Amino acid sequence: MSAGITSPEADLLYGLPSIARYLGLKVTQARHLADTKAVPTFKVGRLVSARKSTLQAWMNELEAGALDQSATRSDR
Protein backbone atom coordinates (compact mmCIF):
# COMPACT_ATOMS: atom_id res chain seq x y z
CA MET A 1 0.00 0.00 0.00
CA SER A 2 1.32 3.47 -0.79
CA ALA A 3 1.83 6.18 1.80
CA GLY A 4 -1.28 8.13 2.78
CA ILE A 5 -3.70 5.33 1.90
CA THR A 6 -5.13 3.37 4.81
CA SER A 7 -6.94 0.07 4.69
CA PRO A 8 -10.66 0.08 5.45
CA GLU A 9 -9.99 -1.93 8.61
CA ALA A 10 -7.53 0.69 9.89
CA ASP A 11 -10.22 3.35 9.42
CA LEU A 12 -12.72 1.56 11.69
CA LEU A 13 -13.18 2.22 15.39
CA TYR A 14 -14.94 -0.66 17.15
CA GLY A 15 -16.70 0.15 20.41
CA LEU A 16 -17.41 3.29 22.37
CA PRO A 17 -14.06 3.22 24.22
CA SER A 18 -12.22 3.46 20.87
CA ILE A 19 -14.52 6.21 19.62
CA ALA A 20 -14.17 8.13 22.89
CA ARG A 21 -10.38 7.84 22.81
CA TYR A 22 -10.27 9.08 19.19
CA LEU A 23 -12.49 12.08 20.02
CA GLY A 24 -10.76 12.82 23.33
CA LEU A 25 -13.92 12.21 25.33
CA LYS A 26 -15.03 10.06 28.22
CA VAL A 27 -16.90 6.89 27.27
CA THR A 28 -20.08 8.25 28.86
CA GLN A 29 -19.83 11.38 26.71
CA ALA A 30 -19.30 9.32 23.54
CA ARG A 31 -22.27 7.09 24.50
CA HIS A 32 -24.51 10.15 24.94
CA LEU A 33 -23.45 11.56 21.55
CA ALA A 34 -24.05 8.19 19.87
CA ASP A 35 -27.43 7.69 21.59
CA THR A 36 -28.64 11.14 20.57
CA LYS A 37 -27.32 10.70 17.01
CA ALA A 38 -25.10 13.76 17.48
CA VAL A 39 -22.05 11.87 16.21
CA PRO A 40 -22.02 9.64 13.09
CA THR A 41 -21.92 6.03 14.31
CA PHE A 42 -23.29 2.70 13.19
CA LYS A 43 -23.67 -0.77 14.67
CA VAL A 44 -21.61 -3.83 13.81
CA GLY A 45 -23.78 -6.42 15.48
CA ARG A 46 -24.36 -4.93 18.92
CA LEU A 47 -21.14 -2.92 18.90
CA VAL A 48 -21.28 0.83 18.24
CA SER A 49 -18.66 1.64 15.61
CA ALA A 50 -17.49 4.57 13.53
CA ARG A 51 -15.01 5.39 10.79
CA LYS A 52 -12.15 7.73 11.62
CA SER A 53 -12.58 9.39 8.23
CA THR A 54 -16.29 10.02 8.87
CA LEU A 55 -15.61 11.41 12.35
CA GLN A 56 -12.89 13.67 10.93
CA ALA A 57 -15.27 14.97 8.23
CA TRP A 58 -17.94 15.54 10.91
CA MET A 59 -15.47 17.51 13.06
CA ASN A 60 -14.39 19.54 10.00
CA GLU A 61 -18.06 20.43 9.37
CA LEU A 62 -18.51 21.47 13.01
CA GLU A 63 -15.38 23.60 12.83
CA ALA A 64 -16.44 25.23 9.56
CA GLY A 65 -19.85 26.05 11.05
CA ALA A 66 -18.25 27.55 14.13
CA LEU A 67 -15.91 29.64 11.99
CA ASP A 68 -18.85 30.84 9.85
CA GLN A 69 -20.78 31.86 12.97
CA SER A 70 -17.74 33.64 14.35
CA ALA A 71 -17.25 35.55 11.11
CA THR A 72 -20.95 36.50 11.02
CA ARG A 73 -20.78 37.83 14.58
CA SER A 74 -17.67 39.88 13.89
CA ASP A 75 -19.36 41.47 10.83
CA ARG A 76 -22.08 43.01 12.99
Image: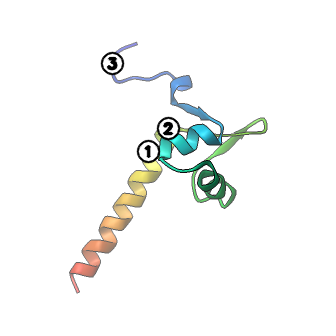
Tag 1, which secondary structure? Answer: helix
Which image quadrant for residue 67? bottom left
Separation of residues labelled 3 and 2 (CA atoms) = 17 Å
Question: Extreme left residue here?
Answer: 75
Kindly identify the amino acid type of the residue bearing the numbered disc 1: Gln
Kindly identify the amino acid type of the residue bearing the numbered disc 2: Lys
Residue 52 point in image, percent of width and height: 49, 38
Task: Indicate whether 1 appears above or below 19.
Answer: above
Separation of residues labelled 1 and 3 (CA atoms) = 19 Å
Residue 63 point in image, percent of width and height: 36, 59
Name the residue tied to disc 1.
Answer: 56
Name the residue tied to disc 3.
Answer: 3
Q: In which quarter of the image is the N terminus?
A: top left
Q: Quadrant of the C terminus?
A: bottom left
Q: Work out whether residue 50 can be spotted.
A: no
Q: Give neighbour class at mark 3: few <14, some 14-19, many 20+ (Cα, 10 Å).
A: few
Name the residue tied to disc 2.
Answer: 52
Residue at position x 60%, y 56% from top?
Answer: 29
